[in-house]
Image: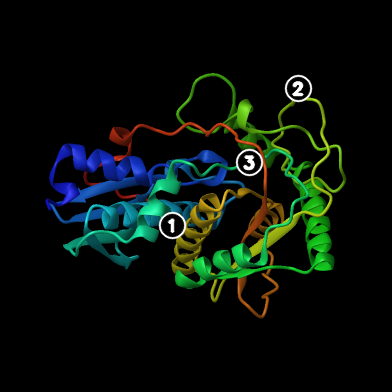
Amino acid sequence: MPFPAATDLGVRWLLAAAGQAPSVLNTQPWRFRIVGEKSVELLADPDRRLRVADPRGRSMHVSCGAALFNLRLAVRVSGHLPSVWALPSPEEPRLLALVRMAPFGPPTAPEQELYAAIGRRRTSREPFSDRRVPPWVLADLRIAASREGANLVLPTMRAAADLLDYAAIAEEELSADHDYLAETRAWTIGGTHADGLPTYVLGPPPADDPALVRYFGVRNARTPERFESRPQLAVLTTPGDRPLDWLRAGQALQRVLLVAASHGLSASFLNQPLDLRDMRHRADPRHRRGHAQMIIRFGYGPGVPRAPRRPAAELRTGDPEPSSL
């Protein structure tokens, strides 16, 4: 079977799959460089980094890690085995990963199912039903995170309530930060764009307190709605809190989200406490299971439209210009 990177059609197919990954404010902060017929390099796009909300580049690395997982999955579905070297060149900080391909054989049924879920996965900011996620599905999500070297911590009902309070407190502090709001609004846009968050994906304003969706600093014309009474939250953690851990978190996040989508689950994020931690350079209160990288809300919700994506041709680059992250 020919290597997918050997033809223009194969390259577009690989990059289309990678580009459907979730990213902070749908910034899509990634580029890809084709190296011969057997290798693809993932590069960060620092022009798409959130300078205010993401001073360390953590969210950018997590986003790129999610794209890396999709790329790995597409390579595997093509009948090849992806080998990944993360952060392979300290002299080129934009180069986050090198993926090399080797012939391997047909993908397994679970791999095909995960790949099929790439197009179905959505971030849903709509109210979810009060139907509980079965324990065996939660177990599948935890296994998915562990396969990428991360942990998915499922808080108790009391801990989840505390987590919602932390998110509400962080939201209140962030809503008074004019630079943060200006940056968020710049990526929360109407009209026809290939990136950012259009108003049709924002969901209704919550009538509940604390809120289960983020405030993006824009006026929402929809009628407020009540959300689920017992939100089901999870915290994705990694052993460390450095760029390699952030890339690992992104790959784990995407595997978890694809497994969730294959089970018919919806998901959204409540990362305000993590944004505030990064912006204020506060020490991370390390949990015994690691450093928090994502706060995820799971449940059963209605179908929602997908946020726009940049065309695959726009994701490809040649030699990048020197630039610091």
Would you name the residue on which mark 3 appears? 124
- Is 93 on the left-hand or right-hand side of 128? left
Label 2, label 3: how many angstroms apart (C-alpha)? 18 Å
Q: Residue furthest top?
A: 191
- Is 199 on the left-hand or right-hand side of 309? right
The residue depicted at 60 percent of the width and 62 percent of the height is 137
Q: Which mark is residue 221?
A: 2
- Mark 2 nearby-residue class (10 Å; few <14, some 14–19, many ≥20): few
Which residue type carries mark 1? Answer: Gly
Q: Earlier in the sequence, mark 2 or mark 3?
A: 3
The residue depicted at 35 percent of the width and 44 percent of the height is 17
**x, y percentage for residue 87?**
34, 65
Does any portion of residue 10 appear in the rendered image? Answer: yes
- Is 136 on the left-hand or right-hand side of 248? right
- Mark 3 nearby-residue class (10 Å; few <14, some 14–19, many ≥20): many
Classify 8 as above or below 34: above
The residue depicted at 74 percent of the width and 26 percent of the height is 220
Q: Are marks 1 and 3 in contact (CB under 8 Å)?
A: no
Q: Which mark is residue 128?
A: none
Asked whether 298 or 197 is in front, the reply is 298
Would you name the residue on which mark 1 appears? 65
Q: Residue furthest bottom?
A: 288
Does any portion of residue 321 appear in the rendered image? Answer: no
Q: Earlier in the sequence, mark 1 or mark 3?
A: 1
Question: Which corner quadrant of the image does residue 132 belong to?
Answer: bottom right
**x, y percentage for residue 67?**
41, 51
Label 1, label 3: how many angstroms apart (C-alpha)? 20 Å
Q: Element at badge 2?
A: loop
